[in-house]
């Protein structure tokens, strides 16, 4: 009887320890920098419906991909394009196939007293520095360089370009005054945090490939957070989730 009680007590301790450990872990979402503000709004809306601890890890898609490939304990990856999400899936690091959650848009933004009515404005001698996300790690950087080349002005202004690792760093350059103008995401300038800062103009969609952004549930979610990961994943495609994306300027289907 005493032995049975000891075994029962040990079993209870194991279960309690497991539950505490499991429930204490946040759902960790790796988010491309352009989707930082919209995902924060999605998180808040989701948490009103479901008790969940959620942590956002914001960086460039390329850097997040490298971290995931090296074992970073993330549960969901919201990339700025489909390429990086597909790379994670084909490497065997995802439980779901990549799916487009929204399509982003590129804008030219300034917080200074400058005219940014179009790309030709970049030729203005008053504009001496242009912040652009690195095309090596950030899909919005690829879109920017593509747009500049298609518009026929890349060669004339390339010496003005200051590269940032991600859209987040590009925004920091602009907000700090380190650059005169910046190419960023529409979702950034429409966010409540930055909508009152500066002015912007949308870049013609014909100048760059559609920025279809992909999401996957990662293998790490199997450890403790699969139900929450699936719940948040489904929320992205719900009517409420889509409305939030639309509010931030994304296209959704």
Image (cartoon, rainbow, N blue to C red):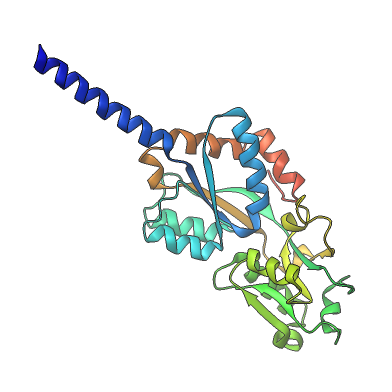
Which one is in front, 212 or 42?
Answer: 42
Q: Residue furthest front?
A: 2
Side (left or right) of 181 relative to 142: right
Report x, y in % for residue 170.
67, 69
Which one is in front, 194 or 162?
Answer: 194
Report x, y in % for residue 199.
86, 64
Report x, y in % for residue 160.
73, 85
Q: Is residue 25 above or below residue 3?
A: below
Which one is in front, 89 or 157?
Answer: 157
Residue at 20% x, 25% y: name it.
Answer: 10
Residue at 70% x, 81% y: name it.
Answer: 161
Side (left or right) of 117 relative to 17: right
Q: Quadrant of residue 48?
A: top right
Which one is in front, 97 or 224?
Answer: 224
Side (left or right) of 150 relative to 3: right
Residue at 68% x, 67% y: name it.
Answer: 172
Report x, y in % for residue 117.
89, 70
Side (left or right) of 162 relative to 234: right
Q: Is residue 159 above or below residue 39?
A: below
Q: How many marks?
A: 0
Location of the C terminus (image quadrant):
top right
């Amino acid at each position: 009887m005493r032995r049975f009680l000891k075994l029962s007590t040990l079993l209870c301790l194991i279960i309690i320890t497991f539950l505490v450990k499991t429930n204490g872990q946040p759902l960790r979402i790796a988010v491309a920098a352009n989707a930082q503000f919209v995902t924060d709004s999605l998180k808040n809306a989701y948490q009103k419906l479901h008790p969940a601890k959620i942590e956002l890890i914001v960086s460039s898609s390329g850097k997040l991909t490298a971290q995931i490939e090296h074992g970073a304990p993330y549960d969901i990856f919201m990339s700025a394009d489909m390429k990086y999400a597909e790379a994670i899936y084909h490497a065997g690091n995802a439980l779901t196939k990549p799916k487009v959650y929204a399509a982003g848009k590129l804008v030219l933004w300034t917080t200074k007293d400058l005219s940014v009515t179009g790309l030709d404005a970049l030729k203005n001698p008053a504009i001496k520095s242009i912040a652009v996300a690195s095309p090596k790690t950030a899909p919005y950087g690829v879109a920017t360089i593509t747009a500049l080349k298609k518009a026929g002005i890349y060669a004339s202004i390339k010496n003005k370009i200051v590269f940032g690792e991600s859209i987040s760093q590009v925004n920091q350059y602009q907000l700090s005054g380190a650059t005169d103008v910046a190419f960023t995401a529409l979702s950034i300038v429409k966010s409540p945090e930055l909508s009152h800062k500066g002015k912007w103009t949308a870049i013609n969609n014909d100048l760059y490939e559609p920025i279809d952004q992909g999401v996957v549930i990662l293998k790490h979610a199997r450890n403790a957070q699969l139900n929450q990961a699936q719940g948040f994943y489904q929320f992205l495609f719900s009517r409420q989730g889509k409305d939030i994306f639309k509010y931030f300027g994304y296209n959704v289907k």
